[in-house]
Image: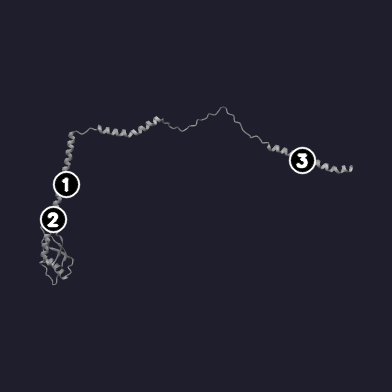
Amino acid sequence: MSATLRYREPYRFSAGMLAMVVHVAFFAMLVMGVRWQTHQPDRFSVELWDSLPVQQPIEEPTQEVVAPKQAVEQASNRAAAPQKADIELRDKKASKPQPSVKELRQKKLREEQRMMEAYVEKQRLAERERVRAEVLAATSAEMGRYQDMIRSKIRHNIVMPPDVQPQASAFFKVTLLPDGSVLDAVLLKSSGNAAYDEATERAIYKAQPLPIPSDPVLKKRFREINLTIRPEDR
């Protein structure tokens, strides 16, 4: 009996120690859980004022509110502005003094006078052009007549070489002095026959003085002339 008790005592001691360790661990868990859930309160400061601050009013953008009646009146005024301007313009024209019958008659006379002057000036210009054309025609005819006289005198002084074709023509530029003397004779286009060209050139110098008009205006036109000399016109 005592031997059996002695054999069981070590196990009682171990079980007691184990129970004590479990209790201690459980107590520690409780303590740690309580500390973990506990928070420090937030810190704050307090400022003391002698009186309440004055709050500045917030300015809001003002917008003109136009009543419907006022808006209609403004639209009507804008629409009536052009009409008013037209009416004022018509009134101004109506208020302008109208010309009298005498003034209208004088204005008509001035217009008729201007028309008459324009007509007279037109006729004068037309007459001047007509006279100018007649002078040019007469001058051209007179120059042609004197050129024919010069060509005829030159042909009568040509010593015609043999075998000259009837259609041969030599073209010369002849420079004359105021008395009809020949200053120079230049062959501009050959007839194709050198003998005929030389004979015509000699005849030009032999026929001087050549006939020229006595009119000073026409005489200036004969300072330098172009002549075509043909044998069949001899």
Query: Which comes sooner in the sequence, label 1 or label 2?
Result: 1
Residue drawn at 70 percent across, 38 percent down: 33
Q: Position of residue 117 (x, y in %)?
A: 16, 43
Q: Are marks 1 and 3 in contact (CB under 8 Å)?
A: no
> In the picture provided, is 214 more to the left or to the right than 89?
left
Q: With respect to residue 126, does 24 lie above or below?
A: above
SS under mark 1: helix
Residue drawn 14% across the image and 53% down it? 133
Name which residue lies at 18% across and 34% down.
Answer: 101
Residues 55 and 181: in front is 55
Tag on residue 66?
none
Q: Position of residue 163 (x, y in %)?
A: 14, 72
* Quarter occupied by residue 201: bottom left
Q: CA distance from mark 1 to mark 3?
A: 146 Å
Read off the residue under disc 3. Answer: 22
Ranked by sequence position, the earlier of labels 1 and 3 is 3
* Secondary structure state at the residue bearing disc 2: helix
Note whether 217 is above or below 1 in the view shown.
below
- Estimate the spatial distance between the alpha carbons at disc 1 and disc 2, rounded to whole Å: 23 Å
Amino acid at pointer 1: Lys
Specify the farthest residue to the top.
51
The answer to which quarter of the image holds residue 114 is: top left
Q: Residue at x 74, y 39 (%)?
A: 26
Q: Are marks 3 and 2 in contact (CB under 8 Å)?
A: no
Residue tagged 2:
137
x, y percent for residue 232: 12, 67
Using the image, tell me which numbered label, if any, was put on residue 122.
1
Amino acid type assigned to the residue bearing label 3 in the image: Val
Amino acid type assigned to the residue bearing label 2 in the image:
Ala
